[in-house]
């Protein structure tokens, strides 16, 4: 009896981990763009949705294999992100916070309407290759292979982001831009191009999260709004521009949400939101964010 | 910090004590609609309720400059308070409004006291999270709120003991219109009072207001509380007229929608809600009958263009056009001299 409880706990924690990792993939781009460019981008979840739909389209209509469709979808999301960054976002940057909120909500609406016009309002499933089906047996615990794959991919991404940011010159430049945009521009950084590339990469990660996490975050037109509150909480609790903060916030939220849904249905959300409220009141800049001037 | 409404409000745009003929227009239109479109009374009442809600948001956002993404919190609290009051205490509508205003005002006071220390992005997040917390409370606290089912079977006894609420919503429409009128007069008095001037000053430059000795935090809390109480009244009207209260009244979507509707009309002008909300809701009513997603597409595009080219909303746009027209009509005369 006890061992069964432990087993179910472990598999729940595992699910929470997978959920949190997808949440991390979707949120990290928003955290970085908000931290670096000081832009409130509520359309960010829309890019995750676009990644998911692109992968879906490439697999079902172009009949590409999973391994080719997902990277192509990520690339497509990045291209679209770069394109929008050069056009619509040039307007958005110039706005106050509230103006940015309104404009990016407007952009989200356009994304939702377009997704519905192209794919309909029903939930679309991204077919998973046979190699990722089934479960992996670890003693009494059975772990779904796809979730393992998901966690592995997200870990690689997180490690890659960490390495680039902390150990390379590009990362040093980005951190410099987060600290002081004006100063970074003064010492000769092409801040505009930098922002564009950062934005596109952030969109790419969101697209990856959208494409891989479609079994936990069902793909439908309202995707772009449904998970917005969750992602915003992760980003603001973690602290803008902080990878560590975003990772911790996403994992904690994923665990509490999954465990809460199982043990105390209904109260899980309340715990998360109350904790967020208290934390943001005490630390408006989030766990690892820098104080905003 | 930049403000969306700064520099779009020339002195003459501010509502003043002096009433002009145009001030009668919205009321004439509302009364005219009552006699001409008597089959659309329930939609009409919904619009009037949302106009009250929009005015309350205008007080916080347009006049005091409090950026909020969570105004539905107060609408929802008001609706739940009125619904609960009607089910368990008394079905008398006017006292229900007072109870709702009190409940929403208390929540506004508490959350304002906590939240208004922050500004900008943190404030946007905090107001949003507050609404989500209240949504979850309403979802979990089944005994009082009915959980996901909401409150239903709300009875509303005849207004003032004589005017029963009819099936066609005629009483409801006039009731909402009367409440809107009272709220509007109160708002006019508030925004033209020294307090109203002070919160406008805080919106323009809170540091300078602090330096000239204004208790900025206290004034903002008061503005937020008043705004919350008015939003609560709007929520109570919704509960009394539709006779149901649901979780959607506490949703992020409602906060976003009222913000969009107000911005379309124009913030900080009192009449913004009178323009944006009827326009949005009437078009939505027509468009939703065809396809709600096309509607979202056009609202999205309109929102982007409006914020970019007319941050003061349709009212500011109309004013700019009028000024340009006046300028064009007057300048050639001077040149001829």
Image: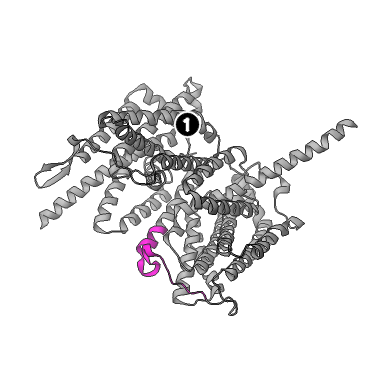
Question: Is residue B255 a member of the stretch shown in magenta?
Answer: no
Query: In front: B254, or B30?
Result: B30
Q: Residue at x 47, y 63 (%)?
A: B77
Determine whether, in the image, residue B49 is placed left or right of residue A168: right
Q: Residue at x 36, y 37 (%)?
A: A53
B82 over B324 or under it: above or below: below
| Residue A222 horizontal/vertical position (percent) | 40, 46
Determine whether, in the image, residue A284 is placed left or right of residue B182: left
Determine whether, in the image, residue B29 is placed left or right of residue B217: right
Residues rendered magenta in the picture: B134-156
Residue at the extreme left: A139
Q: Is residue B6 visible?
A: yes
A121 over B44 or under it: above or below: above
Q: How is the image coloured?
A: one colour
Chain label for disc 1 = A
Q: What element carries label 1?
A: helix
Give residue A221's quadrant in the image: top left
| Residue A185 horizontal/vertical position (percent) | 50, 24
Which quarter of the image is occupied by the C terminus of chain B? top right
| Residue B323 horizontal/vertical position (percent) | 75, 41
Question: Is residue B152 a member of the stretch shown in magenta?
Answer: yes
Give residue A111's quadrant in the image: top left
| Residue B124 horizontal/vertical position (percent) | 48, 47
Residue at the extreme top: A188
Mark 1 residue crowding within 10 angstroms, few (<14) / some (14–19) / many (20+) = some
**Count of picture labels:** 1
B191 over B124 or under it: above or below: below
Overall secondary structure of the magenta section: helix
Determine whether, in the image, residue A171 is placed left or right of residue A137: right
Query: Which residue position is annotated with label 1?
Result: A84
């Amino acid at each position: 009896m006890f061992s069964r409880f432990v087993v179910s706990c472990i598999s729940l924690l595992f699910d929470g981990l997978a959920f949190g990792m997808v949440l991390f993939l979707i949120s990290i781009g928003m955290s970085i763009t908000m931290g670096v460019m000081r832009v409130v981008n509520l359309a960010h979840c829309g890019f995750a949705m676009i990644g998911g739909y692109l992968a879906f389209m490439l697999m079902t209509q172009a009949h590409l294999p999973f391994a080719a469709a997902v990277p192509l979808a990520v690339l497509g999301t990045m291209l679209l992100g770069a394109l929008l960054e050069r056009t619509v976002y040039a307007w958005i940057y110039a706005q106050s916070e509230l103006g940015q909120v309104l404009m990016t909500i407007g952009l989200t609406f356009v994304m939702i309407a377009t997704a519905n016009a192209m794919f309909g309002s029903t939930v679309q499933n991204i077919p998973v290759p046979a190699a990722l089906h089934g479960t992996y047996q670890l003693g009494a615990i059975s772990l779904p292979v796809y979730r393992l794959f998901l966690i592995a991919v997200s870990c690689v991404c997180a490690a890659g982001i960490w390495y680039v940011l902390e150990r390379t010159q590009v990362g040093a430049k980005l951190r410099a831009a987060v600290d002081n945009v004006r100063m970074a521009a003064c010492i000769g950084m092409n801040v505009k191009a930098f922002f564009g590339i950062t934005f596109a990469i952030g969109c790419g990660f969101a697209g990856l999260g959208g494409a891989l996490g479609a079994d936990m975050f069902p793909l439908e037109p309202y995707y772009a709004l449904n998970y917005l509150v969750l992602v915003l909480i992760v980003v603001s609790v973690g602290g803008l521009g902080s990878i560590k903060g975003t990772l911790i916030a996403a994992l904690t939220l994923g665990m509490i949400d999954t465990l809460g849904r199982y043990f105390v249905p209904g109260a899980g959300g309340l715990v998360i939101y109350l904790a967020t409220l208290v934390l943001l009141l005490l630390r408006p800049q989030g766990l690892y964010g820098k104080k905003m001037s | 910090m930049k403000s969306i409404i700064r520099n779009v409000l020339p002195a003459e745009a501010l509502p003043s004590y002096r009433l002009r003929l145009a001030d009668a227009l919205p009321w004439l239109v509302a009364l005219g609609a009552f006699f001409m479109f008597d089959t659309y009374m329930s939609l009409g009442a919904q619009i009037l309720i949302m106009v009250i809600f929009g005015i309350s948001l205008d007080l916080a956002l347009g006049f005091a400059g409090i950026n909020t993404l969570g105004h539905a919190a107060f609408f929802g609290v008001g609706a739940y308070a009125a619904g609960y009051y009607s089910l368990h205490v008394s079905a008398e509508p006017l006292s229900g409004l007072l109870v709702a205003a009190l409940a929403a005002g208390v929540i506004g006071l508490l959350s304002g006291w906590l939240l208004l220390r922050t500004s900008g992005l943190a404030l946007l997040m905090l107001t949003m999270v507050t609404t989500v917390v209240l949504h979850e409370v309403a979802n979990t606290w089944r005994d009082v709120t009915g959980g996901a089912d909401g409150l239903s079977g709300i009875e509303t006894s005849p207004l003032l003991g004589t005017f029963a609420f009819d099936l066609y919503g005629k009483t409801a429409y006039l009731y909402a219109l009367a409440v809107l009128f009272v709220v509007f007069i109160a708002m006019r008095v508030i925004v033209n009072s020294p307090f109203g001037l002070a919160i406008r000053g805080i919106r323009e430059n809170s540091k300078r207001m602090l330096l000239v000795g204004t208790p900025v935090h206290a004034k903002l809390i008061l503005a937020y509380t008043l705004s919350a109480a008015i939003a609560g009244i709007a929520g109570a009207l919704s509960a009394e007229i539709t006779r149901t209260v649901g979780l959607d009244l506490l949703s992020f979507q409602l906060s976003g929608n009222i913000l969009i509707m107000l911005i379309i009309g124009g913030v900080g002008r009192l009449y913004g809600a009178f323009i944006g909300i009827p326009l949005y809701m009437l078009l939505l009513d027509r468009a939703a009958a065809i396809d709600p997603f096309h509607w979202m597409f056009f609202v999205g595009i309109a929102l982007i263009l409006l914020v970019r080219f007319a941050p003061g909303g349709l009212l500011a746009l109309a004013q700019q056009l009028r000024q340009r027209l006046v300028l064009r009509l007057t300048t050639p005369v001077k040149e001829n001299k």
